[in-house]
Image: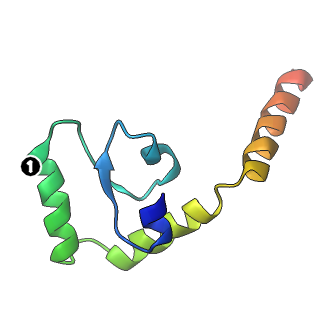
Amino acid sequence: VEAALAELPIVISDQSGASEVLPNALLSEVGDVDGFVQHLFSIVDKKVDVEGIVSENKNAAMNLKWENTASNVITVFNRFLKQ
């Protein structure tokens, strides 16, 4: 999350909790070193939209606030109670 706020492209494991809150991070399977390296090269060689990825991840990270989380939880509870 800190890397997103620092406007850096992100490559993480698909098992990382950050993958849930940074939807545009580049994901590699756990233990897939070649896949991880391919993502790094795609960033360096500009084969991916680095600016778009960085911008979208930064926006996602900036929206990580307790107020937003609480609001989402309340919405889910209210939907459940209306059933």
Judge whether 60 appears above or below 68 on screen. below
> Where in the figure is residue 44, as x and y percent of width and height?
18, 75
**Residue shown at 81% from the left, 45% from the top:** 71
Colouring:
rainbow
Q: Using the image as rendered, state which of residue 64 and residue 23 is in the foreground.
A: 64
Counting the numbered discs, the total is: 1
**Residue shown at 20% from the left, 60% from the top:** 39
Left or right: 9, with 35 as reference point: right
Judge whether 53 appears above or below 21 on screen. below
Judge whether 51 appears above or below 35 on screen. below
Which residue has dot 1 on it? 34
Classify residue 43 by image quadrant: bottom left
Q: What residue type is labelled 1?
A: Asp
Q: Can residue 28 be seen in this view?
A: yes
> Where in the figure is residue 27, as x and y percent of width and height?
30, 49
Binning the other alpha carbons within 10 Å of mark 1 as few (below 14), some (14 to 19) or many (20 upward) gives few
> Where in the figure is residue 25, as x and y percent of width and height?
38, 57
**Residue shown at 48% from the left, 74% from the top:** 55
**Residue shown at 89% from the left, 22% from the top:** 81
**Secondary structure found at label 1:** helix
Q: Is residue 47 visible?
A: no
Residue sitting farthest toward the left:
34
Judge whether 22 appears above or below 31 on screen. below
Q: In which quarter of the image is the C terminus?
A: top right
Left or right: 65, with 54 as reference point: right
> Where in the figure is residue 10, as x and y percent of width and height?
34, 61
Residue sitting farthest toward the right:
82
